[in-house]
Amino acid sequence: MEPKNGIVWNVDPIMFHIGEWSVRWYGLLYALGFVAGIYIVTKMFKREGVNKDLVDSLFLFVVIGTVIGARLGHVFFYDWGYYSKHPAEIIKIWHGGLASHGGAIGIFLMGWLWSKKYKKSILWTADRVVVPAALAAVCIRTGNLINSEIYGTATSLPWAFTFIREDNIPRHPTQIYEALAYLMIFAFLMYMYWKTDIRLKEGKLFGWFMLLVFGFRFCIEFLKMDQSAFEAGMALNMGQLLSIPLALTGLFFVLWKPKPKNA
């Protein structure tokens, strides 16, 4: 299929070089997501009278959980056949390979450890972390777009993207679809936190995040190219299989009726 319409995409993923080191747009956007998260959670803690000094420790835990979880998620969910034979490559995250489902699990586990340390409810912590996490997801998918990766199937739609660095075929820009969806989810969660009393109902913001993000992720996977060869011929790909339990977890907490806590 020759590119006849749409957008020709050939952005260099490298911003600049410092000697032998290259600084990539993806890394900058990844870091920007964490910086925005620190700002948002600091505002939340200030509103609720929580010691703002706890923000730094929380995000240290979140960063560790995100990176380790996302890396191990890629290793075990998508490419264990390779990494089982090349275990030294597991730690080389600069070679690429991060899975958002693993990142979500890693954040939750590290959030649980942080909550234990500082005597907070894990759901209270999760409710506050997921709000900026939705914005971080926007940054990450924008980085994927710049990297010309995680794109969609071929299409003749007028907004198709032709990724010159890949195969020169007009495709669904699924990175943009996801980024826009996560931006709307972020706006929804921000509204719910700041304009309603949902913050007093533990687990609700967490539930909405999980349901909306992974519910959408399940749907958008129908337009995505497979991320690993073993997914060929599968009725549902790995991204969808991993999204189902996470979305159902979100649905449980959305429908769950905890007792409201005092403001």
Image: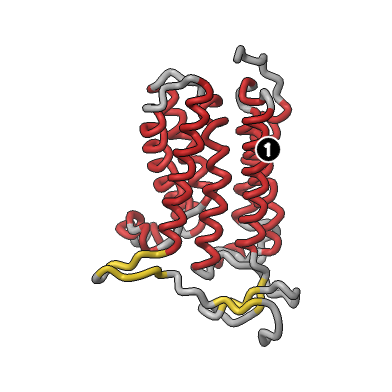
Name the residue: 70% across, 59% down.
235
Could you say where residue 44 lies in the image, as x and y percent from the top left?
52, 29
One can see residue 244 in this view: no
Q: How many marks?
A: 1
x and y, in percent, of residue 47 in the image: 53, 24
**Residue 245 drawn above or below residue 1:** above
Q: Residue furthest top?
A: 262
Give SS at disc 1. helix
Query: Who's the residue at 65% across and 33% down the image?
Result: 207
Q: Which residue occupies the foreground of this view, 8 or 105?
A: 8
Q: Which amino acid does label 1 sit on?
A: Leu
Decide: few, some or many residues near mark 1? Use Cα within 10 Å; few <14, some 14-19, many ≥20. Answer: some
> Foreground: 92 or 111?
111
Which residue lies most toward the right here? 157
Q: Name the residue under label 1.
A: 248
Answer with left or right where residue 200 lies relative to residue 13.
Answer: right
Residue 50, position as x, y percentages in the image:
46, 21
Q: Can you see residue 12?
A: yes
Q: Position of residue 261 (x, y in %)?
A: 62, 14
Please tell me whether residue 90 is drawn above or below residue 151 in the rendered image: above
Give the residue displayed 36% in from the left and 61% down from the top: 94
